[in-house]
Image (tube, grey):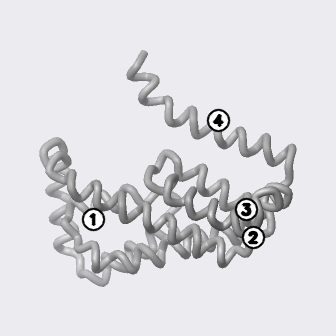
Amino acid sequence: MKNKLKFYGPFVVIILILIGWAILFNIVSPAVIVQKIGIQNAYIFAFVLAVICGFSSITGATFYAAVLTLASGGLNPLILGIVGGLGLCISDFAFFFVVSHGTAVIDKHWEGLSTFIKKWLSRMPAWFIYIFVFLYSAFAPIPNDIMLVSLAIGKTSFKKFAPYLFLGDIVSVIVLAYIGY
């Protein structure tokens, strides 16, 4: 029973949060939510939520739902995208550093996959990896965690791909905010 709760618990929480958002939107319009929070506080809320929710692929849906809500409530999509993208980038940086310190465990338990990723990344030219990081973080509808774990396993230099990840995170939130606007 505990194993099922561990496995299904996060999914149930996400679904309940999304249902809660849907019910809230049927009762209160996004414009009223933004008005109650306040414009300045809404940007701070988006930033903090991005930092907290962006660290895990499980909580990312909550952040994206909030961006859509705040944008449809009248916040400037460009500013919201920059603020939210900055928050996402901070959480991605933290996630990368945590994973990069745990690659020995990954190497030990998933040796075949780890070896494959290292070989594949070593064959790729640096420019390809940087473009891939930008495109993945900007337009892939899945969390950056998979990409960041792969980059950590491959010992990719954080300093070299960080600007592309930063721009990709900002673009992804700007695009989402304009969809909600």
Residue positioned 85% across, 45% down in the render:
26
Residue positioned 87% across, 44% down in the render:
27
**Residue receiving disc 4:** 16
The quadrant where residue 71 appears: bottom right
Q: Quadrant of the N terminus?
A: top left
- Neighbourhood count class around disc 2 (C-alpha, 10 Å): few under 14, some 14–19, many 20 upward: many
Q: Helix, strand, or loop for circle 3?
A: helix
**Residue receiving disc 1:** 151
Residue 75: mark: 2
Residue positioned 28% across, 61% down in the render:
97
| Contact between labelled residues 1 and 4, with CB atoms less than 8 Å apart | no
Compare marks 4 and 1 and give the one earlier in the sequence: 4
Q: Helix, strand, or loop for circle 2?
A: loop
Compare marks 1 and 2 and give the one earlier in the sequence: 2
Q: Residue furthest bottom?
A: 127
Q: Amino acid at mark 2?
A: Leu
Is residue 46 positioned above or below 178 on the image?
above
Distance (Cα) linking label 1 and label 2? 34 Å
The quadrant where residue 127 appears: bottom left
**Residue receiving disc 3:** 70
Residue 161: mark: none
Q: Amino acid at mark 1?
A: Leu
Compare marks 4 and 3 and give the one earlier in the sequence: 4
| Contact between labelled residues 2 and 1, with CB atoms less than 8 Å apart | no
Measured from the top left, where is residue 111 in percent x and y? Answer: 14, 48
Measured from the top left, where is residue 154 in percent x and y? Answer: 20, 64
Compare marks 3 and 2 and give the one earlier in the sequence: 3
Is residue 93 positioned above or below 129 on the image?
above
